[in-house]
Image (tube, rainbow, N blue to C red):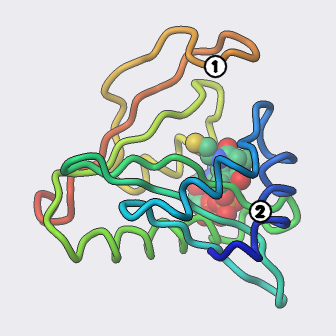
C-alpha cells in the first residue's frame, strides 16, 4: 500500500464498516515500521487491503476489507495468505484480531485459517454496543 492508494482504500473502508478508519489512521499505519499494509488489485484497480501490526511477538490484524463488487472471489484469502507468508519469515508467537460477533462470514474465513475464538470483549463496538470475538492463530512454526 502506498499513499497514492489511500483515496480508494478510504472509499472501500467507508462502504465496509459502520465506524470506518480515518485517512489519518491509514497514514499512521503506512508510516509505522512494524506494520504491514497490503493492497489487492483486480481489473487494474485497488479492490481490497489488509493491515497488520506487530506488538512484541504477536501480529495484530487491524483491518481487512474487500470492495463489495469483488467479494467471494478469494481476494481476502489471497491477502491473508500473503500476510502469513511475510510474517512467517521472522519468529513470532502468532496472530490475533477482533471481529464483530455477528460477522459470520469473516469468522468462518478466519476459522478456515486456523483462528480460534479465545475470548469476548463485551460491548466493544461503540456504534451498537456489539461484542467482539477475540481470535487467535498460532504462528506457522507452532502449526507445523
Ligand atoms: C470479510 C471479507 C473481508 C471477506 O472477503 P472475501 O474476499 O469476500 O473473502 P473470500 O472470498 O476470500 O472468502 C473465503 C471464505 O470465507 C468465507 N466467507 C467469506 N465471506 C463470507 C460471507 N459473506 N458469508 C459466508 N462465508 C464467507 C467462505 O467460507 C469463503 O469461501 P467460499 O466462498 O468458498 O464459501 C469481506 O466480506 C469484507 O470486506 N467484509 C466487510 C469488512 C469486514 O467485515 N472485514 C473483516 C473485519 S474483521
Image position of 75 with respect to 143: above or below: below
Q: Secondary structure at mark 1?
A: loop
Q: Which residue is mark 2?
A: 9
Q: Nearer the viewer, residue 119 or 45?
A: 45
Q: Of label 2 and label 1, which has the lower sequence position?
A: 2
Please tell me the numbered disc located at residue 125: 1
Q: Nearer the viewer, residue 64 or 31?
A: 31
Q: Position of residue 93 (x, y in %)?
A: 16, 51
Please tell me how crowded label 1 is: few (under 14), some (14-19), or many (20+) other residues with Cα within 10 Å.
some
Q: Quadrant of ligand 1?
A: bottom right
Q: Secondary structure at mark 2?
A: helix
Which is more foreground, mark 2 or mark 1?
A: 2
Q: Position of residue 52 (x, y in %)?
A: 45, 56
Image position of 69 with respect to 128: above or below: below
Q: Distance of mark 2 from mark 1, alpha carbons?
A: 21 Å
Give the side of residue 37 with respect to residue 49, left or right: left
Please tell me how crowded label 2 is: few (under 14), some (14-19), or many (20+) other residues with Cα within 10 Å.
many
Tag 2–tag 1 contact (CB < 8 Å): no
Which residue occupies 65% across, 55% down? Answer: 26
- The number of numbered badges drawn on the structure is 2
- Is the CB of mark 1 within 8 Å of ligand 1? no
Amino acid at each position: 500500500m502506498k499513499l497514492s492508494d489511500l483515496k480508494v482504500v478510504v472509499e472501500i473502508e467507508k462502504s465496509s464498516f459502520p465506524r470506518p478508519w480515518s485517512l489519518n489512521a491509514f497514514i499512521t499505519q503506512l508510516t509505522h515500521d512494524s506494520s504491514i499494509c497490503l493492497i489487492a488489485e483486480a481489473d487494474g484497480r485497488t479492490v481490497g487491503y489488509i493491515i497488520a501490526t506487530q506488538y512484541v511477538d504477536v501480529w495484530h490484524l487491524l483491518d481487512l476489507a474487500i470492495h463489495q463488487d469483488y467479494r467471494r472471489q478469494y481476494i481476502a484469502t489471497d491477502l491473508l495468505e500473503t500476510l502469513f507468508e511475510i510474517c512467517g519469515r521472522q519468529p513470532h508467537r502468532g496472530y490475533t484480531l477482533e471481529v464483530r460477533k455477528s460477522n459470520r462470514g469473516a469468522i468462518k474465513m478466519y476459522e478456515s485459517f486456523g483462528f480460534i475464538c479465545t475470548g469476548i470483549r463485551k460491548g466493544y463496538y461503540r456504534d451498537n454496543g456489539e461484542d467482539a470475538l477475540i481470535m487467535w492463530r498460532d504462528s506457522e512454526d507452532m502449526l507445523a
